[in-house]
Amino acid sequence: MPDFQQPRLEGEQLEARYAFAKRVALEAAQRAMEFYTRRSSLIVEHKGSDLQDVVSIADQEVEAFIRGELARHFPDDGIVGEEGGSDGLQARCIWVIDPIDGTACFLNGLHNWCVSIGLLVDGEPLLGAVADPNHDELFHGFIGRGAFVNDTPLQAHGASHVGEGLVGVGTTHRPGHEHFLPFLHALLDGGGQFVRNGSGALMTAYVAAGRLIGYYETHLKSWDCLAGLVLVREAGGRGNDFLRGDGLLGGNPYLVAAPGVYDQLAAMIGASLDAP
Ligand code: IPD
Ligand code: CA
Ligand code: CA
């Protein structure tokens, strides 16, 4: 909650951060692309014991670039980044970044990956930028000012039934994956259909763009979706209370959807979506 005793953040201070997010997302995506073109030479490491949870120097170097830009331009802001952890969480402005979302795709030569940079102000998502260099798309948005892909405004799908479009899905080996197959069953039984492209940030942006009618992941991290939450909200979509509890650092189940099918999808997932 905003503290009324604190001075307001001036519009130009936030404007500068919006311009920063867009610029740095694009530059970071170009740096990632340089690694992508020589991906076969990258050493792939595993995070912990999950062999599917991969990382390379590309993720680390791109995050280091973003952190360096932040230190130069907004040294007092906080940060939550997938590779480098969190710092300065007492700050009013907290950047939430994923240097490469869709790392498994990236390392396997699939063109579904992006850079995601979001900003929380006083605990609320305010702006976000998601850069996809394979398709020359920069998704960006600012609360109250709309969401865009490049210069084109985004609008969530007008579906009123899950049969009217595609639902993005995702899961990991983390707790919660037991809810995945029951959801797919319910979706198919209800006349829906699913896709998984391997990048939660992109699938969230696609919900904002009306390309997908929804996206469900059994357990997502904040850096996968913080920028996307701004896009979905500004495009007229709906999302669950993802940041509740330890959402910022620990993650939560996640659903974003077109307004006409959100309740239908939430009912298919059941109580686990908003469980404490
Ligand atoms: C992953 C992707 C994937 C989702 C996973 C995320 P990463 O992020 O967004 O689509 O299913 O939950 O961890 O590891 O590629 O940054
Ligand atoms: Ca990610
Ligand atoms: Ca990542």
Image: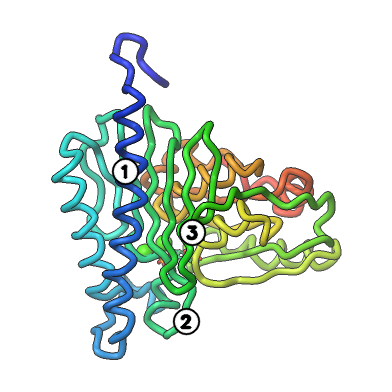
State which image quarter holds ligand 1.
bottom left
Label 1: state its secondary structure. Answer: strand
- Mark 3 Cβ and ligand 1 under 8 Å apart: yes
Q: Determine the image quadrant of residue 2.
A: top left
Earlier sequence position, callout 3 versus callout 1? 1
Which label number is shown at residue 179? Answer: none
Q: Nearer the viewer, residue 253 or 228?
A: 228
Query: What residue is shown with label 2?
Result: 110
Give the residue at x 28% y 68%. 59
Q: Position of residue 39 (x, y in %)?
A: 31, 85
- Answer few, some or many: residues within 10 Å of disc 1's Cα (few below 14, many 20 plus, some between 14 and 19): many
Which label number is shown at residue 95? Answer: 1
Q: Quadrant of the C terminus?
A: top right
Give the residue at x 78% y 49%. 158
Q: Position of residue 30 (x, y in %)?
A: 31, 69
Residues tagged 2 and 3 counted as in contact (Cβ below 8 A):
no
Q: Is residue 212 above or below residue 39?
A: above
What whole-number distance in Å separates the C-alpha atoms at marks 1 and 2?
27 Å
Earlier sequence position, callout 1 versus callout 2? 1
Query: What residue is shown with label 3?
Result: 201
What whole-number distance in Å separates the C-alpha atoms at marks 2 and 3?
15 Å
Label 3: state its secondary structure. Answer: helix
Task: Residue type at mark 2: give it.
Answer: Leu
Give the residue at x 20% y 39%. 74
